[in-house]
Image (cartoon, rainbow, N blue to C red):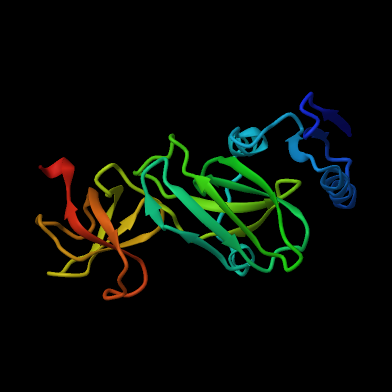
Amino acid sequence: MEVTRLPSKRVWLLHWNSTMTHHGLFSWFRLVARAGAVATLVLMGFLPGTTGLLGQASSQGQQLQPTEELLRRPTAIHPVSGPPGTVVTIRGLHLPAITPVNIGFGGTRSGFEGLAFVLTNTEGIVEEAVEVPDWADHSRIHRFIIFDAYFEPIAMTTLFHVTDERGRIRRAGVVSRLGPTCGQVTGEDGEEYHLLDQPAPLAVGSGVVMEGRVVDSSRCGEGIHLAEVSFPSRE
């Protein structure tokens, strides 16, 4: 471990490697707090805002899926959709108390970018506002995920819907059910999309690219409900 005290005397940098324990890290936080300084951590050379180990893990084929273990810790987000640049508040519960955690953002079949490094409180709660990165694509699914200091995932949110400037998402998939309402498309991402309106003739089993606005509804059962649906490839 190497500690650097910057000229301002109120900002210290910790260059931390995997040999440092959580207890040692917490002791360092207490030391900094007593000195009235601001703690900024550099994890193995990476700062929040870089892909770091997450990008390396992705290039090696690691895929993070919303397992029951990850989803059992309630992790709320508000809002649940928006374009790149949207400020989202993440609130995680039942996390390890007084423990440093990383908040990341990305796709479940791709790498995650680290956005913030924060400390949980004595009740195992963390609440932090972060910004959706400018690279976020409205044609892919995304989630926020909470990692421990070793970048092991410990909690995951439900989907965050990245939209374009019109508030719409785009998905590719296969038509799995038809009807005047509640038509259904199984997305290439494995999600089920319910179409609350169907402006174009479709055939079950056909591939489509669709755009629509995500709405909060359960009219068609579990899955993602889309309104104002259009099919750009057919227009």
- Looking at the image, can residue 208 be seen? no
Q: Going 60% across and 32% down the picture, which residue do you hit?
A: 50
Left or right of 189? Residue 44 is: right
- x, y percentage for residue 219? 27, 76
Q: Nearer the viewer, residue 85 or 145?
A: 85
- x, y percentage for residue 209? 24, 46
Quarter residue 11 falls in: top right
Q: Which of 122 and 83 is in front in this view?
A: 122
Q: Going 44% across and 34% down the picture, which residue do you hit?
A: 135
- x, y percentage for residue 74? 58, 68
Left or right of 19? Residue 13 is: left
Left or right of 131? Residue 71 is: right
The total number of labels drawn is: 0
Image vertical order of residue 140 relative to residue 154, above or below:
above
Rendered-image quadrant of the C terminus: top left
Rendered-image quadrant of the N terminus: top right
- Looking at the image, can residue 95 be seen? yes
Left or right of 174? Residue 11 is: right
- x, y percentage for residue 38? 75, 40
